[in-house]
Image: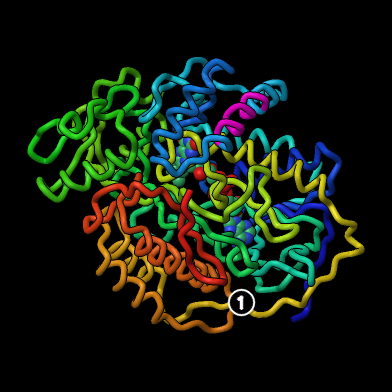
Amino acid sequence: MSLHEAYEADLVVIGSGVAGSYAALAAAELGAKVVMVTKRGLLSGATPWAQGGIAFPVGHEDVEQHLYDTVKAGRGLSDPDVTGEILKESLDHLRSLIEKGMRFDPGLAREGGHSRARVMHAGGDRSGLFLLNFLHQHLQSRIKILENRFVFQLATDDNGVSGAYYLDGSKRVGVVKASATLLATGGSGQLFGVTTNPGEATGDGIALGFGAGCVIRDIELIQFHPTALLDGTLVSEACRGEGAKLINAAGEYFMGGYYPEAELAPRDVVARAVDTEIKKTGGVFIDLSSIANFEEKFPTVFASIKALGLDSRSEPVPIAPAAHFQMGGIRTDSEGRSGVPRLYAAGEVGSTGLHGANRLASNSLLEGLVMGARSAACAAKELEPISTLGIADPTEANGITHVGRAEIQKIMSESASIVRTGPELESGLDRISAIGYLPSLDSFEIENSNLALVASCVLRGALAREESRGSHYRSDFPETSEVIFHVEQSLDGLKTVIC
Ligand SMILES: Cc1cc2nc3c(=O)[nH]c(=O)nc-3n(C[C@H](O)[C@H](O)[C@H](O)COP(=O)(O)OP(=O)(O)OC[C@H]3O[C@@H](n4cnc5c(N)ncnc54)[C@H](O)[C@@H]3O)c2cc1C
């Protein structure tokens, strides 16, 4: 395969969301030569869509309580040591962002699962976009940015990963040879037909990491956001924090019957309640009429509702749960090391142990910042001279041509959604396993094959997790197992690891 372009770097960052951008900035500040590759524009990925904000502990005195809330939501699968470190360190990054000129809105918001108001916003409900624009302004002149380049393969030598191969829009192949490679590729919400995630969320980083020998941990744990508009657009959790109520099609406020804190219950509880009430009464609606100054506080939500021809001030708006966040991912240590030499992972693609079986609202931008910075610092410390790296030639990737993305999403929605059963998961796995692959240099087809690989990991993991925990609910195993375990998958197969 001939190469159209080639770059060299100390660190190649794959992804321009919060984790990738903050890592790139941190590495550049440490003097590293950085190339950042992103498969669409700089504002691709989930980060610019983040509405709710960032949950920082309210000073050092709140770290313990934030840790308690996070671990409680994680239902036994969060690692309290790593979580505590990340939360504590987040305050340094908050300070550093403010010193660099990042402007947060005054006041703090409270969201579901948080025992107090601690969520910071920027630009109302455009927190992710504001943060990302801010990071990109600081990055532009300091690193090389390659947009519209789809990474389809990691470059390797005998000792580990040595960079990344990508395709440009004309299917030409390029490479960044690098002493360290960071996967910051975000999540995999496109596994499901109804998702809050952008089109880029196709699990590419999981597939790349899996192929390189990483351990994929707890990937079956997928958070479904309880309140999406029927086109998948998110109605932020913060709306419920501000007093929005859920009503079923029979006109009843029902959340109080499911959880003492009603609308402020953790996401998995609200998502299952909404799913149950939709099945029971035919629909669920969100009543936003009690939120003062709703249009100013939630301009994005207001506009999305308006675009559907509805008026949130005068009528409750129909909602449904949607695939939202991948709790599991590439298992990393607390510095972002993936276990494969020279390969790091940060942000939604990684599994540090922070989110456990259920992410606490607004904890993921925080994790992206801290783990982006930590991975960059660790990589910068461990850099090998580029002259010592080898690089194997790229090979054509697997693509799926004969099965559309909609078919994969249908299989997953039918077999691995909010309420799961063994037979449905088995059937989903059979259908995904029957898909055939062809060599391809088409990024959409390669994304589909990445989705199919992640789908099979989700289905296998969900089958192995014969219990209900956090976001994972098996109606044939409704109890939470007393034995707490991780499900780990790699090229060597699947194993459960007791915590
Ligand atoms: C609608 C919505 C609202 C949310 N609200 C909040 C919130 O209020 N607070 C909060 O904390 N979290 C929120 N989240 C979750 C949070 O936004 C994400 O978890 C977080 O932004 C992920 O950041 P990331 O940097 O890991 O990945 P992303 O921001 O998803 O970025 C991934 C990047 O990788 C690139 N990429 C992917 N594959 C490839 C490839 N093969 N080659 C090259 N580039 C590639 C993409 O183009 C993109 O640039 C929300 C998520 C959604 C979808």
Q: Which residue is mark 1?
A: 397
Residue 296 appearing in the image: no
Q: Residue at x 60, y 33 (%)?
A: 86
Left or right: 344 in relation to 203: right
> Does the residue tagged 1 have its C-beta within 8 Å of any atom of ligand 1?
no
Q: Position of residue 302 (x, y in %)?
A: 35, 33
Residue 178 appearing in the image: yes
Q: Residue at x 74, y 81 (%)?
A: 1
> Is 333 one of the magenta-colored residues?
no
- Neighbor class of circle 1 (other Cα within 10 Å; few <14, some 14-19, many 20+) is some
Q: Position of residue 218 (x, y in %)?
A: 46, 55
Left or right: 483 in relation to 127: left
SS at badge 1: strand
Residue 384 position (above or below residue 255) = below
Residue 456 position (above or below residue 343) = below
Q: Residue at x 66, y 28 (%)?
A: 93
Q: Amino acid at mark 1?
A: Ala
Q: Residue at x 57, y 61 (%)?
A: 215
In this orientation, which residue lies closer to the viewer: 472 or 409? 472
Left or right: 399 in relation to 414: right
Q: Position of residue 388 (x, y in %)?
A: 90, 64
Left or right: 450 in relation to 421: right
Q: Quadrant of residue 417?
A: bottom left
- From which residue to which does the magenta span run? 83-92
In this orientation, which residue lies closer to the viewer: 441 or 346? 346
Q: Position of residue 432 (x, y in %)?
A: 39, 75
Q: Quadrant of residue 289?
A: top left
Magenta: predominant secondary structure element? helix
Number of numbered discs overlaid on the protein picture: 1
> Is 87 one of the magenta-colored residues?
yes
